[in-house]
Amino acid sequence: MARRIPYVLGLLAGIIPMLALRPAALKSQTPAAGGAPVDMLQLTAEAQTWLTDLIRVNTTNPPGNELEAAKYIQGVLQKENIPADILEMKPGRGIVVARLQARPLPDSSKALLLLAHLDVVGVDRAKWSVDPFAATEKGEYIYGRGAIDDKGMVAANLAAFIGLKRSGTRLSRDVIFLADDDEEQGGDASIRAVIERYWDKIACGFALNEGGNVVLQNGKVQYVAIQTSEKVAYNVTVTATGTSGHASIPQKDNAVVHLAAAVQKVGTLETPLHLLTMTRRYFEQLGPVEDEDTAKWIRALETSDRADLAALRLAAMNPMWNSMLRDTIAPTQLTAGVRANVIPSQASANLNIRLLPGNSILDVIDQMQKAVNDPQIKFTVQPDAGPSAPSSSITSELYQTIEHLAPREFPGAPVVPYLSPWYTDSSYLRLHNVQSYGLVPFPLTEADLLRMHGDDERLPIASFRRGVDFLYKAVHEFVTK
Ligand SMILES: [Zn+2]
């Protein structure tokens, strides 16, 4: 067993703050059916150790160095007598995969994949108050790059997986554990390559991954958002051309001026609003826990005369909702000029565009061309578009398991299906007919969520332990069905 935290320390670290979230949250040691009781106090304390150990392996991508973290997990699994394969995707870049088998063997379309990624984004060390790779405990938090994204989930998945093994639960379906690599860059060691090369090792019909949230407000879980689909990312270059020349004699066709005007117009362009079925369901479920003014506009979405106005109001209220309701255009990079006193013949900008599933990039370019209306401006779609995958179902057994469990675990908290504006590995799984769901199980405030990819990323210890418990229950319930 990996460096277990002494029982009393575990109590101090975990239980006292946890009481604030929900009394007796971890007392239930046996999920409804199947297997022996698992000591959740011990398991969550061990999971905390795995999390801190993993943060201490610097897997900043690039270069990644995930192999070392994969080997650490292999060691943890071996102590539980669970064989685990390391698959080296590239030198230094490895993933770890392990399986608990159901008997009799069902077909792989029933199998559940527990997925999380080992790599993390880089840090600006000067802006951190602690060493980002020391997993410092400060106050009620563990600080470290990857604490939320995504090593917390790696440790929680590992705990659920090991909990099932320890309980001796009779599985109705295989459970596969996968800690993969290269998620943050989506390069040639990423899930796409794993699927291409090793699908036989991870073939599944269901998956749990990052992407959704347990949303905490004023000490109470407000709702549980399960990510069921994602927007599709494009990069489009907007280029202005003009006459180059001496800066002392400017002309009206200055490329920098034309580019600036174009960027201003596309950067503030309000593309048409689309209320997708999944987003409609999201708002329906969310309405009852929102304040009265917001709830009023959510109800108006269902009216024939005020639906358009309601969508407009909701988009204006919250940047996240705006992103869920329309295609978005974000100028991200500017390139122009070689000398301070030379007017360049060309200036360009990168536009990062996120499309709602099913929408066309050509439509967005058409809207931008009309808004800019400038013959000196040209738009070019870059070939690095993200995958466009179908949504996961909200009537599948896995979704419904979580939908029923969450309000029992977090009283009054509805489950809402969530279209994320960002990419996750689930897209490639969905393209392989996998019902993949995003659920980071830790109750987190918006303020803590915003630290993902930012400075002083941190995870409240009580939330981590609560999330491990919740995930274990969800997985246990699903794999005994
Ligand atoms: Zn992530």
Image (cartoon, grey):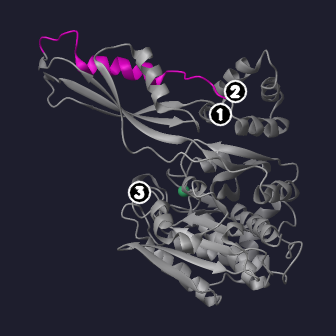
Asked whether residue 215 is in view, the answer is: no
Give the SS element for disc 3.
helix
Q: Amino acid at mark 3?
A: Arg
- Verify CB contact (< 8 Å) between mark 2 and mark 1: yes
Q: Residues within 10 Å of mark 3 (few under 14, many from 20)?
A: few
- Circle count: 3
Q: Position of residue 331 (x, y in %)?
A: 41, 31
Disc nearer the start of the sequence (3/2): 3
Q: From the image, tell me which residue sits under label 3.
A: 125
- x 50%, y 50%: residue: 454
- x 45%, y 25%: residue: 267
Question: Which quadrant: the C terminus?
Answer: bottom right
Q: From the image, tell me which residue sits under label 2.
A: 314
Tell me which segment is drawn in magenta. 248-274
Measured in 3D between alpha carbons, the distance from the residue under mark 3 to the one under mark 2, in whole angstroms, is: 37 Å
Q: From the image, tell me which residue sits under label 1.
A: 321
Residue sitting nearer the eye, 218 or 365: 365
* Side of 409 relative to 128 (left or right): right
